Each structure stands twice: as structure tokens, then as C-alpha cells.
Image (tube, rainbow, N blue to C red):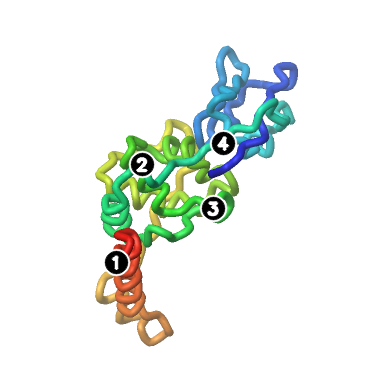
Amino acid sequence: MKTVTLLSRVDEQKCIGCRTCERVCPVLAIKVVDRKALVDADRCRGCANCEQRCPTGAVTMVRREAPLTIGVDINSVDYGEIIALCEKAKLHPEQRLCYCVGTRADEVAAAILLGARTPEDVSLVTGMRTGCTIECIQPLLRLLEAAGCELQPPEGGWQWYGRTATAWDLSEDIKQKYDSRGFYFDEDRALFEKLVEEGKKGGAGE
């Protein structure tokens, strides 16, 4: 669970309608209408991207009158389905995907199984990508792809980065090339698969 204590506030006198804030918001909580940025307080997750990137200093972060708690209850979904989705994405269910917020793979998988279909959907309900907003897009895209979601970055958005290759994506030529340089891709894969098997037992209460 994450407690959101901050909220974006726009000074209309300083706002020039450049849409920078709109492009960097990981939950699509800020939109420019009639050349002025408007904040959807219910969607804002307090990441401060808009404040940090605004070229005119029109956005500031203020304290919410009442903190907002967000998170997905993994017990609301069959844990076997969570494990299956994480395994398909080559992620351990207990793996921490977002270090800034602490979101784990099982919570993201639960969000997807409950209907989240985009990174913005997942970020809205879990808080993932509302810290640095950079690194955790990779495993998030992997989980969404594993669930069969058709992914299309928001128009004009700047928060999506391409998927990085995993040990499962590498060709035999690449693996052989780097084996002599201290990389052990097959061993890494075998270790992960062992961990997933242990995770299945844990999820079943064994």
C-alpha cells in the first residue's frame, strides 16, 4: 500500500499551456484545456514530475487535506493465476519491481488480472512509476505483454521506454559470445525457474 500525501497545484498566471506536465504524468492526471493545465485530484499520485519539469514554475506540490491510500489486495485474486502470469513474464511473484514505491510483481499481476490494461492503469491503482518513473516501466511492460495487452504509448507522452532484452530473449550466438566474459545466462535462467517453483509452493501454502 502507498499513502499519497501530496497533490499538484497549478498557478494559472504562470502556466503557458506547453503540455510538458501532461506528457510526463505517469497516471494521466494533468491535462491542458484552453491553454491551462488542470489537475484531476482523484488521479494525482504526488510524483512531482509535473512540478520538476514545468519550465515556468507554474506547478507546485501541496499537502492533501486527507491522505490517499492506494494499493491492490493480492488476496482478491487467485494466487495461482498471479504466479502463472508472473512466470509467463519471467518475473518472480515476490520480486520488487518499483524500488521507489515498493510495488511487487504479484501486486502488479493482480492489478492486471483485475482489469488494468496499460502502464497508466497499473500506476494509478498500485503507485508504481510514481517515484523516479524510469526503471520500473520494463517489468511492467513485460507483465502487460504476458497478459496479452495491446500496448500503445499515450500520444505525445515521454514516460515510456522500450523493453530491454532478458536472458530469455537472447540468441545462442549472443550467449556464446558473452559466456567467456563472465555472463551465465543459462545458469541465471535455471536459478529463476527454481525460485518460481519454490514460489508456487509458498503460494499454495505448502
Q: Which residue is most to the top?
A: 34
Please tell me which residue lies in front, 26 or 155.
26
**Label 3: few (<14), some or many (≥20) within 10 Å?**
some
Q: Which residue is most to the bottom?
A: 180
First in sequence: mark 2 vs mark 3: 2
Spatial CA distance of label 1 from label 3 is 25 Å
Q: Which residue is mark 3?
A: 102
First in sequence: mark 2 vs mark 1: 2
Spatial CA distance of label 2 from label 1 is 30 Å
Name the kind of residue labelled 1 in the image. Trp
Asked if the residues shown at circle 4 and circle 2 are in contact, with their CB atoms under 8 angstroms apart, the answer is: no
Q: Residue at x 53, y 28 (%)?
A: 43
Q: What mark, if any, has residue 168 been given in the picture?
A: 1
Q: Position of residue 157 (x, y in %)?
A: 48, 35
What secondary structure is marked by label 4?
A: strand
Q: What mark, if any, has residue 69 been given in the picture?
A: 4
Q: Which residue is mark 2?
A: 76
First in sequence: mark 3 vs mark 4: 4
Quadrant location of residue 169?
bottom left
What secondary structure is marked by label 1?
A: loop
Name the kind of residue labelled 4 in the image. Thr
